[in-house]
Amino acid sequence: MGLQPTSEQGAKWDIPLNKTHYPNAYFKEEVDGWHGYIEWEKYPEKKAQAANILSKYSFADPPEFQLQPLPDTNPILEGVRWKQYHAALGSTLEKLPEESWDIVKKEKSVDMIHVLDFPYNGEPPRDRLIKTPLTSNEDHFVRNHGGIPVIESDKWFLDVGGLVNKPQRLRLSDLQNESIFPRQSAVITLQCSGTRRIEQIREYPGEGDELINAPWGEGAIGTARYTGVSLKKVLKYCGGLKEGAHDLEFVGVDTYFKKGEVYNYVVSVPYRKARVHEVMLAWEMNGKPLPKIHGYPVRAVVFGYIGARSVKWLSRINVISEPTRAPVQKKEYLYFTPQIGKHNVTYSSGFSIQDMPVSSAIMFPLDKSVIIHSGSITMRGWAFSGGTGGNWPERVEVSTDGGSIWYETPYELLSKKYLHAWRTWAIDVPVDAEGWLELVVRCWDNALNTQPTFVRSTWNWDLHVTSSCHRIKVYSVNKSRPRTAQRLAELEKRGIPFEPITRPLEFELESDERYEEEMVNRVGRDPDE
Ligand SMILES: Nc1nc2c(c(=O)[nH]1)N[C@H]1C(S)=C(S)[C@@H](COP(=O)(O)O)O[C@H]1N2
Ligand SMILES: [Mo]
């Protein structure tokens, strides 16, 4: 069945998925060998045509999960609206959701937490992420805003233009020609500015449009060795910068939808970032070609900045005089004060998030777990500090009482220092107390920056950069305490599992004789006089 109007004449059209619809829209792919790439930025009239088509449909509302619980499914969210956007634009993009999902299945670990089916967003299981200082390509988180383009590496090229003296078209073989460009290789942590957003959502929900796609936990961060060339060398090869050059605009080929309009994924970073060799054009991730899902064949890697600037499937770099007005830069990734929200938010009132601040997370144990121990608990996690020039976690501290008393994690258990990467950490922390405890972590970086104390201190309408001390709750059962040891032994004898803790004990907690003895020992319930 084709498209049906929702009601009377003039109403918008509902868009069914998996439809065979009229060839009402057809947008040609721009370049042979670049599948899933429609160029929008060069053709304003084509953009207008797409916006006109989109305006004819009514799309599914975003699911409400911020004021209600998240679905207990994997994928957690489906992305119906984004699938519909792609379908509405006709046959060129219509199959992208399925094709992208096939790539997810091929390239990512089977047990990823699929935060969103489409555009694909996923993070690895918490305890595995920090088992190794480098993240495997299969486990590295993915943050996509659209479908995954598939580009043949020998058909790929990069256009460098704008305020450069000699605009150039470079192929992968040019970038890889070591007689022109020396190699650059570095261990880099990429962190999405949405990492740990779920903590902000739980306390105070925020903007529910774009963010609906990414209710991240602590796993939207990953560390890999990237290999490529320093963008500074490429700009030099292009004759250097012209007068007035200030920012570098990166164009990714994927299609980005925002408020009824279409774009390619475009952001910018200041030139000063490239000047200090902190922007790499990378084609290798952990010694292997970039996976398709991570930007094959070439992506930008911007050290210490929010992940959003590290553009995947890079096709063009424009040297410009001011930060780009493209919506990802201008309308997204803004940081607001806590007084700003639906009632008064504007784009200009937030600042544009670039540098990632110091942050950390407890990846083991998991929140709400029950830990039976003999006086100490093992904690493990990551700590990271972004920025420019290189920052690194110098000290990681944990608390088992919500942040009154802190223990320094032993330096032998911190992974190697890099200028632009996280450090994994571990500690056996003494725990005497029983019952619910709040475990906390905070990091101090080399510049003595540390983390805000509570989520409340970092809450912002777009729910970005949850860099407050990470807090989890665990239920402590200290079997070095005689009464606890006795209770555990009794449960074992009776073959009753300890968990879930919420299940009532079916046997008496104490014999009548013992109770009477105790009452004597405690000198009764009430005072004598
Ligand atoms: N072309 C393109 N580049 C992109 C994105 C995108 O959607 N399209 N997402 C950005 C965001 S928000 C992040 S956090 C990182 C994630 O990189 P990864 O998926 O390789 O982990 O890619 C960035 N680069
Ligand atoms: Mo991101």
Image: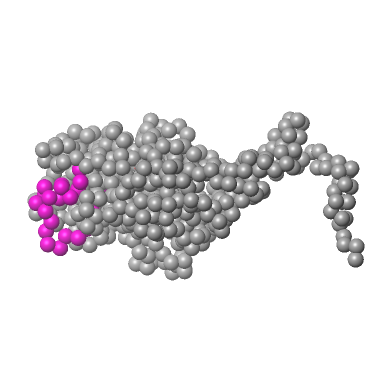
Visible in this render: residue 87?
no
Instruction: State which region is magenta.
Output: 229-253
Q: Quadrant of the N terminus?
A: top left
Depth check, front residue: 517 or 299 = 517
Q: Can you say whether 389 is above or below 481 in the image? A: below
Visible in this render: residue 156?
yes
Question: Would you say residue 352 sits in the magenta stretch?
Answer: no
Q: Quadrant of the C terminus?
A: bottom right
Q: Is residue 205 left or right of residue 528?
A: left
* Residue at x-position 48% and y-position 48%: 409
Quarter location, residue 181: top left
* Residue at x-position 22% and y-position 50%: 277
The image shows residue 129 at horizontal and vertical percentages of 44, 39
Depth check, front residue: 63 or 268 = 268
The image shows residue 333 at horizontal and vertical percentages of 37, 57
Question: Would you say residue 239 sits in the magenta stretch?
Answer: yes
* Residue at x-position 22% and y-position 62%: 322
Q: Is residue 466 left or right of residue 503?
A: left
Depth check, front residue: 214 or 360 = 360
* Residue at x-position 22% and y-position 42%: 184
The image shows residue 249 at horizontal and vertical percentages of 23, 54
Q: Is residue 309 left or right of residue 11?
A: left
Q: Can you say whether 203 is above or below 169 in the image? A: below
